[in-house]
Image: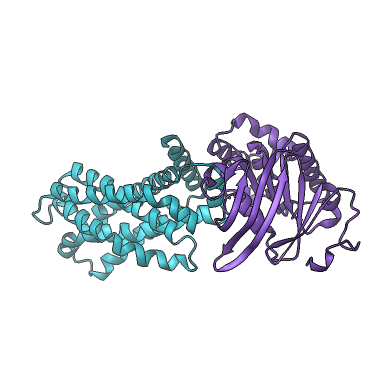
Chain colours: A purple, B cyan
Amino acid sequence: MVSIVSLQSVVALLGRFPALAGADLEVGEGEIVLVQGPNGAGKSTLLRVCAGLLRIESGRAEVLGHDLTTDRAAVRRSVGLLGHDTALYDDLTVEENLRFWAEASRVDVAAVPAALDRLGVADRIRDVAVRDLSAGQRRRTALAAVVVRRPRLWLLDEPHSGLDQSGRDLIDQVILDAAAAGATVMLASHELDRTLDLATRHLTVAGGTITADRRGGDGGDRPDTPQPGDDDAA
Amino acid sequence: MLRDAWLVARKDLRIEWRSRVTFSQVVPFAGLVLVLFGFALDANRPVLLQATSGLFWITVMFVSTLAVQRSTSIETTDGARRALLLAGIEPAAVFLGKTLAVAVQLLAVEVVLVAGVVVLYGADVEAWALVLATCLVATVGIAGAGTLLGALVAGVRARETVLPILLLPVLAPVLIGATRAFDDALGSVAVDGWSWLGLLAGFGVINVVLGALSYGVLLEET
């Protein structure tokens, strides 16, 4: 299996606080990895480290074959991150935003309409300023910006946040399609009812460390089902 | 790099065009400052003429803090700074693009301000070429220093108040050089304005080079 993410005893700080305190992780191609855990556990930090946005203080880390201590720029160019922020400019239209990010990422802007179609962003709002969109429409647009990049590693932080039922279903399908095409997806989520079935692997993060790592997408290891090793999971 | 710089500048200018912040807020603010300076000096025309150059550039300094704050907030409001890093744009290109966009906006305000000092203060421009050259060269330095310091304070709480405290002292050489050059252009003081352009050009080059080299560190750390 091709290694996409490889972390060994990785420590990352937020200020002086060790938000990631010795994480070990191997993620392969095509996996859909759910990162779950309580607030402040380190889920978002883990995704930011994998995106090359947060410097690691110690340990070894490689993402998509690039060393995270020496070649973060290459990592950043290769991943797609949907964070809590949407990284959209309020005064630009939906289409202008996506065209800008496509050009900035050196991706063919011709892919923009298809990405908006894929995320169900209606034609009638493509010329609307982002400031006039609903939270759900913003979220869909932000994910469309990730789709345009066609990254090998998708890092999605609460991707279903603010979306209606059809939007959530659509996001699930986008994730499944990405994985089917060979991409790897890591998503942090509190929506376990939905994401446990979606993911092929479940990580539990607590106190900045990975406390449980289970494979299987059959939903048989939901938190309310006792599992070996649950004692140390938050 | 120039392609990416133009991409960023075009985006910032498009945002400005849509939001009309410069025309609806910054230009009226600049005009108001000119008028209030006139009141403060009791509409004394000889005094106003003597002080026109300084008042003009002090107004530009005030305006520059607004323009830089606006330029910075565009990237910080919804996490676009991080997305710029992920897109793989060279930080130097981001710096150059944002500097260019701020400079264009400041130049637009300066055009209005020049008209303002002519109409309100009765200033008589004797050397339009020197006025034009001073505005161009000084504005590059102001925009460069502002963009750099805007990135420096981007992660700071209460950055709106911290930015002017940092920026205005840094711009002191521009205030001095541009005021002297304008004194010559307006015929209010007998100095060689063109020689002051050298100081302004040096300041501009230092700020642009320093910004291009250090902007990446600031994007990473703030």
Q: Position of residue A73 (x, y in %)?
A: 52, 44
Query: Can I make out residue B115 in this image?
Result: no
In this view, the residue in front, A129 or B24, is A129
Q: Is residue A39 above or below residue B141?
A: below
Left or right, B6 with reference to B81? left
Q: Position of residue A212 (x, y in %)?
A: 78, 59
Q: Is residue A190 above or below residue B106?
A: below
Q: Quadrant of the N terminus of chain B?
A: top left
Q: Residue furthest left?
A: B190
Q: Position of residue A74 (x, y in %)?
A: 55, 41
Query: Can I make out residue B162 in this image?
Result: yes
Report the residue at 58% width, 37% height from top.
Answer: A102
In this view, the residue in front, A100 or A195, is A195
Left or right, A122 with reference to B97? right
Left or right, B149 with reference to B130? right
Report the residue at 74% width, 36% height from top.
Answer: A118
In this view, the residue in front, A34 or B76, is A34
In this view, the residue in front, B219 or B174, is B219
Report the residue at 66% width, 42% height from top.
Answer: A146
Left or right, B94 with reference to B55? right
Report how many numbered discs are placed on residues in the image: 0
Q: Position of residue A134 (x, y in %)?
A: 70, 52
